[in-house]
Amino acid sequence: MILKNKFIFWFLKLLGFEVIAITIYPFIILNFDEIPKHDLVRIINHEKIHLAQFKELWVIGFYFLYIFYWLKNIITLREVKDIPEDAAYFLIPFEIEAFLNESDKQYLSKRKRNEWSRYIKKTSEIKQTYLETDQKNNKS
Ligand SMILES: [Zn+2]
């Protein structure tokens, strides 16, 4: 179910999170005023991928693992200097699955159960690349 709610985004902004969409099972909440029309389908697809992840992890498992991977990324990436600002968020396996497949409108119909878990390895690989690049840059 898609909801339009400004208050939640105002509240998240106060907490330091600037987002235009959020999924809190079973709702997808959108900040319509901030979403360009041509991005709407892609963003809704992104959030629907999160709904599928929520469902297969019985909701509570999703929250638990989401926070777990986010904190793990913050800790493992804390000493990397050359890194995009929101890397800890973008490298959560749930987000990698959603970002890499959000433009594919057929994705959800062909998606396998617990597909997000295939992206755990990808998270580690990308983190390793950041760490190695950072080490090289600091040596020279
Ligand atoms: Zn997301």
Image (tube, rainbow, N blue to C red):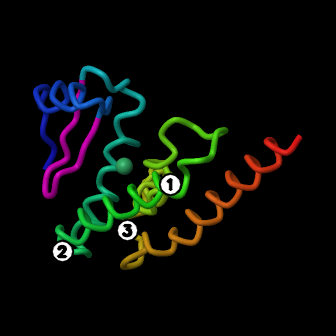
Q: How many numbered circles does the render carry?
A: 3
Q: Position of residue 94 (x, y in %)?
A: 40, 61
For the view shown, which residue lies furthest in the bottom direction? Answer: 113
Numbered disc 1: secondary structure: loop
Label 1, on which residue? 91
The amino acid beneath tag 2 is Trp
Label 3, on which residue? 109
The span picked out in magenta is 21-32
The amino acid beneath tag 3 is Ser
Question: How many angstroms separate mark 1 from mark 3 (CA)?
Answer: 24 Å
- Whether ligand 1 has any atom under 8 Å from the Cβ at mark 3 is answered as no
Q: For this view, does 53 lie left or right of residue 115?
A: left
Estimate how packed mark 1 is, as few (under 14), some (14 to 19) or many (20 or more) residues with alpha carbons within 10 Å: many
The amino acid beneath tag 1 is Leu
Numbered disc 3: secondary structure: helix
Estimate how packed mark 2 is, as few (under 14), some (14 to 19) or many (20 or more) residues with alpha carbons within 10 Å: few
Depth check, front residue: 111 or 138: 138
Q: Is 103 located above or below residue 54 in the figure?
A: above
Residue 58 numbered tag? 2
Q: Position of residue 117 (x, y in %)?
A: 45, 74
Q: Position of residue 2 (x, y in %)?
A: 16, 44
Residue 29 sits in quarter: top left
Numbered disc 2: secondary structure: loop
Q: For this view, does 94 lie left or right of residue 17?
A: right
Whether pointer 3 and pointer 2 mark residues with C-beta atoms closer than 8 Å, the reply is no
Q: Main secondary structure of the magenta part?
A: strand
Q: Position of residue 110 (x, y in %)?
A: 43, 72
Name the residue located 64 percent from the left edge and 39 percent from the top edge: 81
Name the residue located 44 percent from the left edge and 58 percent from the top edge: 92
User: Which marked residue is nearer to the observer: mark 1 or mark 2?
Assistant: 1
Q: For this view, does 2 lie left or right of residue 52?
A: left
